Amino acid sequence: MKIKMLVMDVDGTLTDGKIYMGNAGEQMKAFNAKDGYGIAQILPKIGVVPVIITGRASSIVQNRARELKITELYQGVGDKLTILKQVAEHYHLSAEEIAYMGDDLNDLECMHYCGYTACPRDGAAELKRYVDFVSSYDGGSGAVREFVERLAEMAQTTA
C-alpha cells in the first residue's frame, strides 16, 4: 500500500484540543513544531500531500497551514467525508492511498473510508478500536510527527 495523501483534523490532533479565549474574544491555539517539521519537510520527500479538514474555522489554522505550505485546507466542514472524497477525486486517489489522523468520533466516517488511519494517544477511546495506529503522543504533542515518521517507514518498505 502506497500512501499518497495524509488528511488531518486540527483540534485534538494538530493541537491539544484546547481553545484559549480572551476577554475580547480572541482565540489562541498551540501547534507542535515537530509536527510542523514532519508535515513541511518529511511528507514532501515521500510524495505525500498534506490536507487539513476541520469542523471549526479560524484564521489561526489558515496561518499555520500557510506556514506549512498546506494548500488543501478545508475549514468549517460539517460533512468531512464528502470533502475528503472530493479531494481524493481531484488527486485521482483511491481510498487505500489515503491516510487519516483524527481524534474524535466526528472523524470516524473518514477513517472507515481511508486505507490507513491513526489517532493521538488521548484520542476518544471508542475511536481507538478502529484505527491502524495509535500514537504514543497526545494530540498537539508530536502525535502527527510520529504518524508521519510511520508513513515514511512504510514508504521505504514499498519502494
Image (cartoon, rainbow, N blue to C red):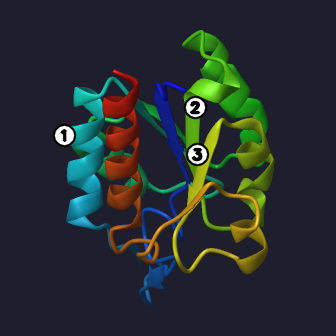
Name the kind of residue labelled 2 in the image.
Ile
First in sequence: mark 2 or mark 1?
A: 1
Q: Quadrant of the C terminus?
A: top left
Q: Position of residue 142 (x, y in %)?
A: 33, 68
Residue drawn 21% across the image and 63% down it: 33
| Dot 2: element | strand
Would residue 137 be found to the left or right of residue 17 on screen? left
The disc at residue 111 is none
Whole-number angstrom distance, CA of label 2 to CA of label 1:
19 Å
Residue drawn 19% across the image and 40% down it: 41
Q: Which residue is mark 2?
A: 98
Q: Position of residue 20 (x, y in %)?
A: 44, 83
Would residue 97 be found to the left or right of residue 33 on screen? right
Name the kind of residue labelled 1 in the image.
Gln
| Dot 1: element | helix
Asked if the residue under mark 2 is in contact with the one under mark 3, i.e. CB atoms within 8 Å, the reply is yes
Q: Position of residue 30 (x, y in %)?
A: 33, 73
Crowding at mark 1 (Cα within 10 Å: few <14, some 14-19, many 20+): few
Q: Which residue is mark 1?
A: 41
Would residue 147 be found to the left or right of residue 78 on screen? left
Asked if the residue under mark 3 is in contact with the one under mark 1, i.e. CB atoms within 8 Å, the reply is no
Whole-number angstrom distance, CA of label 3 to CA of label 2:
7 Å
Crowding at mark 2 (Cα within 10 Å: few <14, some 14-19, many 20+): many
Name the kind of residue labelled 3 in the image.
Tyr
| Dot 3: element | strand
The disc at residue 100 is 3
Locate residue 141: give its quadrant.
bottom left
First in sequence: mark 1 or mark 3?
A: 1
